[in-house]
Image (cartoon, rainbow, N blue to C red):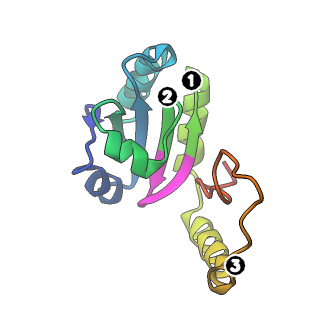
Amino acid sequence: MPIQTLTQHTFDRVVHGHPVVFVDWWAGWCEPCRHFEPVFQESARRHPEIVYATVDSEAERALVGMAGVSQYPTLMVFRDGLMVYSGAGYLAPDQLEDLVQQVIWLDMDEVRREVARQADQEQPQQNAPAPPAPARPRAGVAGPIGYGWPGL
């Protein structure tokens, strides 16, 4: 299957419409992105049962913002519509193949149980009063980032 180009209009349909989707977020000015491209293409050739897709970050700024991508290349992997991996930086061919195998053998029942446990733990926090604002503003993300499956 050829590598698909995702847009803001096609992203959800592709991610939720296929069992396994690897998404490469790239930028034209990014040197590591250019080095990762043939690695990604070779993996796509070796694994036609997996959907491989790319997002051009310069053309899809709104999608990049919604996904919270800030480094390139960033690879996100979705299994049954759930993000199970997100990582920035170049992956060597053997590293990408190892990730493919981990995702293929991932126990999705356990992933769903873990997602449900995390949702249950976050539920009381949503009703709690907001903490006081810090004395000085700080740069960075406010709160924890819940990317992907911690077992990968």
- Could you give the CA–CA distance between mark 1 and mark 2, rounded to whole angstroms? 6 Å
Q: Is residue 140 left or right of residue 109?
A: right
- For residue 90, the mark is 1
Q: Is residue 108 above or below residue 24?
A: below
- For residue 121, the mark is 3
Secondary structure, mark 3, is helix
Magenta segment: does it hold 24? Answer: no
Q: Nearer the viewer, residue 137 or 98?
A: 137
Q: Nearer the viewer, residue 55 or 95?
A: 55
Q: Is residue 73 left or right of residue 63?
A: right
Q: What's the amino acid at mark 1?
A: Tyr
Q: Sequence order check: which comes first, mark 1 or mark 2?
A: 2
Q: Main secondary structure of the magenta part?
A: strand
- Residue 114 visible in the shown view: yes
Residue that extends furthest to the front in the rendered view of this protein? 135
Q: What's the amino acid at mark 3?
A: Gln
| Residue 16 image point, x, y percent | 34, 59
Q: Are marks 1 and 2 in contact (CB under 8 Å)?
A: yes
Q: Quadrant of the N terminus?
A: top left
Q: Residue at x 74, y 53 (%)?
A: 136
| Residue 104 image point, x, y percent | 52, 48
Q: Magenta region: which residues? A: 77-85
- For residue 73, the mark is 2
